[in-house]
Image (tube, rainbow, N blue to C red):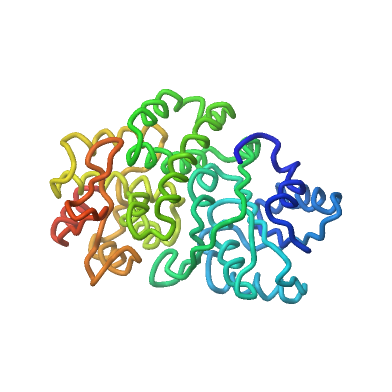
Amino acid sequence: MVGRGLLAGLPRLLGERCPAHAYAVIADSRVAELYGARVLAALRDAGLRALLFTFPAGEWNKTRETWTDLTDAMLAARLGRDGAVVALGGGVTGDLAGFVAATYLRGIPYVQAPTTLLAMIDASIGGKTGVDVPAGKNLVGAFHQPRHVVADIETLATLPRPHVAAGMAEAVKHAVIADAAYLEALLADAAPILARDLDALERVVTRSVAIKEEVVAADPLEGGRRQVLNFGHTIGHAVEARSGYDLLHGEAVAIGMTAEALLAEAAGVAEAGLAPRVRRALELFGLPVTIPEDLAAEDLLEAMRGDKKSREATVRFALPSRIGAMHQRADGAWTVDVDEDTILQVLASSR
């Protein structure tokens, strides 16, 4: 559900879509300060039992240790199997709270209430949950679909500009993989989007959710077509992890898409000129498009070898053939095996 003022109606929506004896509202420290008291008061005023559980903000806190702290706190509060989780916040919260819900007492229902652009258009849709580990990003997790997703556009009014830009990396990805006309619309709307115009942002959320929803519905467990959503993420996740999560997720994905578009041309699966078009679109939203100098190509490649998308130690990529379409192999597969020499060459030229 996409709209304005939806958080005020959360008690009714929970009663309709995710009835429970009690609700564990999980939020990071920043979102708890902004919206925690408001959401808790709304639930309690409606006669619902609700408890707020928080964790320190930041991707570096999306860990097994934080998962342990949250589940232990919920157990201490005696939340039973008739309870449910509300994931209130950005993509980190959605991933982490969803994993708590997937594993708590062998699984309880949850609702996503995203408050960032990236979470609204990407992280909250599709049921991927998990935590980061030393070996890489999101390597421990589960598929656990939310009962409902409530995207209140008004929460984006408080979103800092870098986080708006980071969310737009995923919107550009959706356009590149599925809808060339959508990319042109995003470019035309760039100024109002970055100014946090709610009408423009609502258009972004609505179209991106439709694209991701259609892909996920056709392949919920990422056995085939859903892999196209990983465009930019193989290199992006490596950059994000090796940078110590100094980069926002969307910033790392923007770097990854720029490099992987070059890789698509180098591997001969994309039409000429794809890479500069992707790069210009990302630059228009103020996103980084080059790999930081202090990240060695060999270290990034090593991180990619451990990525969950790799098979038999071969690094695989989901690559576009042109704006609006992804490359599909003759055997129907949506990923491309690329030799390591080519990967290293592209990484070297992406600085």
Dividing the picture into quarters, in which one does residue 282 lie?
Answer: top left
User: Is 175 drawn above or below residue 94 in the view shown?
Assistant: above
User: Is residue 154 left or right of 321 when viewed as pictured?
Assistant: right
x and y, in percent, of residue 220 in the image: 44, 56
Please tell me how many numbered marks the rendered image carries: 0
- Name the residue nearer the viewer: 87 or 287: 87
Query: Which residue is depicted at the point 53% across and 64% down?
Result: 62
- Is the residue 56 above or below the residue 292 in the image? below
* Above or below for 100 versus 19: below
Considering only vertical position in the picture, is 264 above or below 246? above
> Residue at left 80%, top 48%?
42
In front here: 81 or 275?
81
Q: Quadrant of residue 222?
A: bottom left
Image coords of residue 229 (percent x, y): 37, 50
Where residue 279 sits, quadrant-wise, is: top left
Residue 274: where, in percent of width, then height? 22, 36
Residue in the picture at 78% in, 53% down: 40
